[in-house]
Image (cartoon, rainbow, N blue to C red):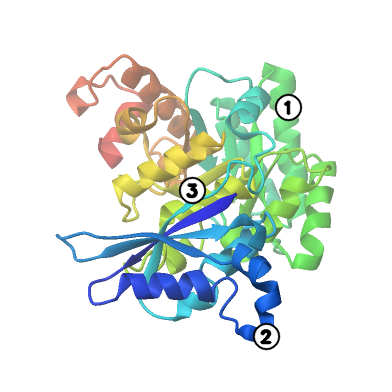
Amino acid sequence: MTIEVDYRFPPGVDPYKQAKIIAVGQTVGTWDARFAHREKALRSHLGEVLSVRTDPQTGCSIATVCFPEANVENDISSLLVMIFGKYSMAGAAKIVAVRLPQNYGLRPKLGIAGIRERLGVYDRPLIMAIFKPALGLSATDHAAILAEVADAGLDIIKDDEILGDLDIAPTLQRLDACREVIERVKQKTGRTLLYAINLTGRADTLLEKARLLVRQGANALLLNVLCYGFSVLEALVADAEIQVPIFAHPAFAGAICAASDHGMAYSVILGTLMAHGGADAVLYPAHYGSLPFDASEEGRIRNILRERNVFPVPSAGIHPGIVPKALADYGQQVILNAGTGIMEHPDGAAAGVTAFFEALERATKGESFALEALPPGPLRRAVEKWGS
């Protein structure tokens, strides 16, 4: 089995020469007559340049290099070392696609189907909120916010990715306070509400901390995968004690992906690698949100994730007014993730959740979101504030 990687080079760079350097230098390297007796084994680990094509309009070139799967350890970390490792410091080159064998890496424990089964919701997009403000709230404050949005029908809530295990609201205290709300909602309504609690700490403590959180009732985890490492994600996915969905946050992705001629494409990092790393759901910016993002790249992330049963979670600036666009792009298999779009609704967080459900119903019926067409209520108030 082989791994194919597309490298994009800007005008002025010899793409075949650079692709050959990658194919050789990122695999076996060169050898001389002293190793003639190992020729067959060495060649079995050697990369190969499959093709080079140049766009006449931009002058950029795409070179495809094929790597033997035998060179890596069926994980993301060794893969990154092989396909970009040292070469990432060699000059202008950007990885724009990685094609892995289907059995490479891990699959999500739950993914789209499993998360829907946990929630008992199968026929609509899921609505997710974020605790705001991000810092400075106590565990009791978190529980009060959760109670408000839970009663309005929210499906999932998560910590802000910035929130660590801080003295003002230690992770276990937040979990204990919020678990009481979750249990009360379950007893009262029969509904399950997921709380993706932020997993933080050093590598030598993270796995046991995750196990402890699950034993204490955590029913979902949030992980800043790029800051803590793909190996942490893979360890969590592989652990038999951690049978809860893992929501992967894109923090730090811009440092790897945003440059035009260096790094890796967002669809590689937040699509391919997250999907083969075992994440159950992946957050990333929506192109109609508050962060600059390319619509075609967003579409590639969505499709890559869905191919492996991973929930796409467009985020950053999501509010009820964009629901028609989101449904047009995603259909039903999406988690709509809103922070200020729920928490800063003019009539409170519960009204923010209600506005999303009103928006889903109205968009499904194909009804107008023009302000003059909206009846009084939470959705109209949201559109007045954020537009449509």
Quadrant in which residue 81 is drawn = bottom right
The image's mark for residue 271 is: 3
Relative depth, front residue between 192 and 260: 260
280, above or below 265, in the image: above
Question: Which amino acid lies under the numbered mark 3 shown in the image of this protein?
Answer: Gly
In the rendered image, which residue does mark 2 sit on?
A: 34
- Label 3 vs 2, first from the N-terminus: 2
Location of residue 106 (image quadrant) = top right
Residue for badge 1: 184
Report if the CB atoms under discs 1 and 2 are less than 8 Å apart.
no
Tag in front: 3 or 1: 3
Q: Residue at x 25, y 35 (%)?
A: 388
How far apart are labels 3 and 1 at the CA level? 36 Å
Question: Mark 3 or mark 2: which is in front?
Answer: 2
Residue kind at label 2, given as amino acid type: Arg
Circle number at residue 153:
none
Q: Nearer the viewer, residue 131 or 362?
A: 362
**Residue positioned 39% across, 66% down in the render:** 94
Q: CA distance from mark 3 to mark 2?
A: 43 Å
